[in-house]
Amino acid sequence: MNIKKIYMDSNALLEGHFLLSSGNHSNYYLQSAKVLENPKLAEMLAKELAKQILDYALKVDCVCSPAIGGILAGYELARALGVRFIFTERVNGVMNLRRGFSINKNENILICEDIVTTGGSAVESAECVKNLGANIVAFAALANRGFCKRVNSKLEQKIECKIPNNIPFFALEDFLFEMYNPNKCPMCSNGSTAIKPGSRGN
Ligand code: ZN
């Protein structure tokens, strides 16, 4: 399965000159919501991710995602694994389990995101359910930005990764982009102007 082509064809992977929320510039922009707006594609990608997890012979009772970004990917993954799905959400900046969701003691939970950059939100979500008695068995994402080491990839973990390296992390693909300080951006040097993704209907 050519994940990058699927993302490109869905306009979920854009090539150009972008201003990221971090303030840096990049030649690519990744927006998983664009691939997940097609339920058939979402189902196909989640099944592919589920295959890796099942091959690893992990016992998963429940998938949990940090809202909002992880919800669609996590829900489809839970469907593919045949387990229940819950999500955590931030209340005044702190990750919480709301909406009547509860955790069974020692329930084996997999945390799922759409994209993992450093894994910050995924880890906050994991801490939240762990404090309620869950056992975190794995992390997963459709796309890995290349800071964290995933199962089945030779890519090394970078210092920025927040996912603990004693817990397996599954993803479909590594998406490595160049990121530039605006003062050192070669595209800016060539006279082009960085565009904020979304500002032109992206
Ligand atoms: Zn630039």
Image (spheres, rainbow, N blue to C red):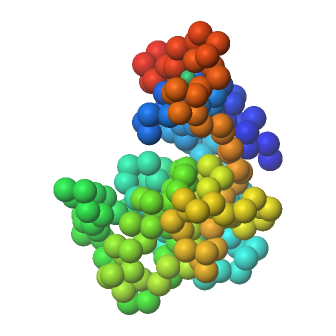
Nearest the viewer among 148 and 60 is 148
The answer to whether one can see residue 50 in this image is no
Q: Residue furthest left?
A: 92
Image height of 68 relative to 52, above or below: above
Residue 155 in which image quadrant: bottom right
Nearest the viewer among 88 and 190 is 190
Residue 93 in which image quadrant: bottom left
Nearest the viewer among 141 and 78 is 141
Q: Residue at x 65, y 80 (%)?
A: 58
Q: Residue furthest front?
A: 183
Q: How many marks?
A: 0
Q: Residue furthest top?
A: 191
Q: Residue at x 64, y 23 (%)?
A: 186
Percent position of residue 104, x then y: 37, 85
Image check: 110 left or right of 106? right
Image height of 18 relative to 103, above or below: above
Q: Residue at x 62, y 49 (%)?
A: 145
Percent position of residue 17, x then y: 59, 22
Percent position of residue 131, x then y: 33, 81
Image check: 123 left or right of 165? left
Image height of 182 relative to 106, above or below: above
Q: Residue at x 73, y 43 (%)?
A: 3
Nearest the viewer among 180 and 116 is 180
The answer to whether one can see residue 30 in this image is yes
Image quarter for ligand 1? top right
Percent position of residue 48, x then y: 71, 57
